[in-house]
Amino acid sequence: MSETLAPPLEKAPDHVPPELAFPFRVGSAPGIEKRAFQAVIGAFRERPDIFFAVGGARTGPGTWIVTRHDLVREVLMDSDNFESRGRVDISSTLGEHLPLIPIEMDPPEHVKWRAVLDPIFSPKRMKALEEDIRQLAIDLIEDVRAKGGCEFVEDFSSKFPTQIFLRLLGLPLEEAPKFLAWEHAIFRGADPDMRRTAYRSILATLRATIEERKRAPTDDAISYVATVKFDGRPLTDKEMAGVCMILYLAGLDSVAGMLGFMFAHLAEHPADQQRLRDNPDQITDGMEEMLRAFPISSPARIVKRDLEFHGVKFKAGDIVTAYTISAGRDAREYKNPDKVDFDREEASHITFGVGPHRCLGSHLARRELRIALEEWLKRIPPFRITPGDEVVTNGNSILGVMRLPLSW
């Protein structure tokens, strides 16, 4: 998710030991535009397990970066010392305060909000959506199958999750190009004015739809948000807008990025691709292993009080980024972590987070990814990176695939 970046510091705060301070931003890691994961993981392995990235914060001038799997997990599980409130700043971009529910809520409030919002993404509801998701995947694949190739990001991975979320939220499918343009401005655009305009346009659209659903609810997520009660009362207008904004933003770029890296891997590793073709019952296991290898985003927390964390002194108000990106490649947790191994014994991962803020939409994301893999491998012949062309990746708060030319 994109946030407002404060001007970078020239040096770390006084309480940061010089040996733990490094000028570092994920988006400027050498090689990020060609091999995002190799660039980021390589940079992290040259640093201590906990270090301070000068100028590297997502909501401020600097951040502690925690890279080791067990330490990442500890930060995400510990809501007593690390809080979510205030970790994402789009309010300054919008020019008004918007409560981003539930990701900026901490226990016990967060638990109550999750109980209210969980039905939107319940396994039962996701199963009911499966037929529509599969048909959309088939339609998009059939549009390119006879062409012998495609630009995967433009033709599939950006359209697929966007249209699914438009259906889930109850927004008009015919306006998908407009929503895609706004998504591009927020997650990939470099112009802050365009980002601001996109945020405000999305918010205005969501608010107008919320008002319509208040008057005439239908069977969609915005109707649910517009009519559900929290602690026995209706949600306020700002709460409704904040929930819908998070639902919209969280459901788009994350799945698109995951799809991009998964299909890039299969295009570059024909044996893995053929194995899933020959053994479709292994697609789910293969998907989970690729999720372990390609986590695309890493959550941030704010230190609630001065504390010592594994020998490092944190000050209240410090930002800590728990890098699930590196946790998934931690050699202390996984044997040969850089290898995508469909037979891996250590099958678990924390790509969707862990603890109270575990991804609300993980059931939907997994369903989208699995169906996309199933239908592509069923309908498209063996594919590869188009000869003479190349994959283009990027990264800031979210790693992504900008261009993936495939041919078959």
Image: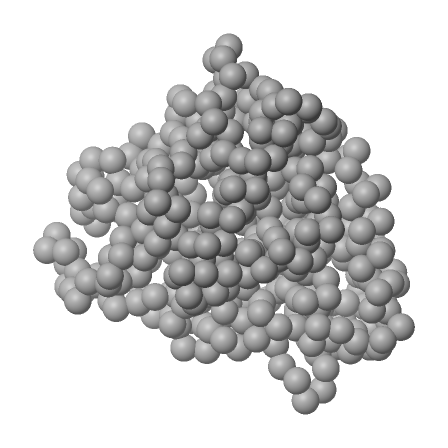
| Left or right: 122 as drawn, with respect to 248 | right
Q: Position of residue 220 (x, y in %)?
A: 69, 31
Percent of width and height locating residue 23: 25, 68
Q: Is residue 66 visible?
A: no
Residue at x-position 71% and y-position 73%: 151
Q: Which quarter of the figure is the C terminus placed in?
A: bottom right
* Residue 240 % position (x, y): 51, 29
Query: Which residue is located at x 68 percent, y 51 percent?
Result: 175
Horizontal side of 84 relative to 177 (left or right) equals left
The image shows residue 107, relative to residue 260, as above or below, that is: above
- Examine the rendering and report whether any part of residue 95 can be seen: yes
The quadrant where residue 360 appears? top right
Q: Nearer the viewer, residue 342 or 120?
A: 120
User: Which residue is at the far left?
Assistant: 14
The relative height of residue 281 versus residue 190 in the rendered view (above or below) is above
Which residue is rendered at x = 69% and y = 76% of the image? 405
Q: Residue at x 24, y 61 (%)?
A: 7
- In the picture provided, is 250 more to the left or to the right than 89? right
Q: How many marks?
A: 0
Q: Is 394 displayed left or right of 211 in the figure?
A: left
- Which of 42/182 is in front? 182
